[in-house]
Image: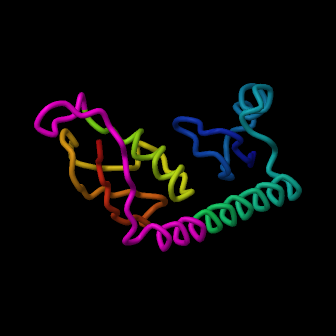
Amino acid sequence: MKVLLEQDIKGTGKKGEIVNVSDGYARNYLLPRKLASPADSSAVNAMNIQKSAAQHRKFQAGIEAREKVKKLEGASVTVKARVGENGKLFGTVSAKEIASALLEQRGIEADRKKITVEPIRSVGEYTAKVSLFEGVSTTFRVIVKE
């Protein structure tokens, strides 16, 4: 029996695949648990529509990321921190603080986990790298002031 998988099933296949399984396995396990549906033309068509919509969303996200990269190239972000003697910071400037400064000053929302920067422990100018999408990344300056 041919079924369209609704979820990843170990040893059988991945979500969205059409696989040929035994009739008993399909009737007694996959179909009652809603792990799969019969592979009729309407189910296959619905899955194809969902896949094309997901591809379109991913394409649009890539375009938006490239626009953000153009805005961010050569830009600088200023982060204010508490400073002790000799220009040393109390703690470090984290990626979370840089991400909030990016949103506040440039209007660019970036995940803190996608920002890579060397540990910032003193006042000065540093270079950070942000990855906004698969294969779309850029560097920008981070200026730390008192």
Residue at 30%, 54% (x, y): give it.
143
Task: Report the span colored magenta.
Answer: 62-91
Q: How many marks?
A: 0
Q: Is residue 23 left or right of residue 77?
A: right
Q: How far across and down, in percent of the image, does residue 80 sit?
A: 36, 42
Q: Nearer the viewer, residue 110 or 53?
A: 110
| Residue 64, image quadrant | bottom right
Q: Quadrant of the C terminus?
A: top left
Depicted 56 relative to depicted 2: above or below: below
Q: How far across and down, in percent of the image, does residue 51 sit?
A: 70, 59
Q: Inspect the magenta stretch and tell me whether residue 51 lies in it.
A: no
Q: Is residue 52 left or right of residue 91?
A: right
Q: Nearer the viewer, residue 3 or 120?
A: 120
Depicted 26 relative to depicted 108: above or below: above
Residue at 48%, 74% (x, y): give it.
70
Q: Is residue 7 left or right of residue 70?
A: right
Q: How far across and down, in percent of the image, does residue 76 sit?
A: 37, 62
Q: Quadrant of the N terminus?
A: top right
| Residue 42, image quadrant | bottom right
Residue at 27%, 49% (x, y): give it.
117
Q: How far across and down, in percent of the image, does residue 35 sit?
A: 72, 34
Q: Residue furthest left?
A: 86
Q: Inspect the magenta stretch and tell me whether residue 69 lies in it.
A: yes
Depicted 71 relative to depicted 109: above or below: below
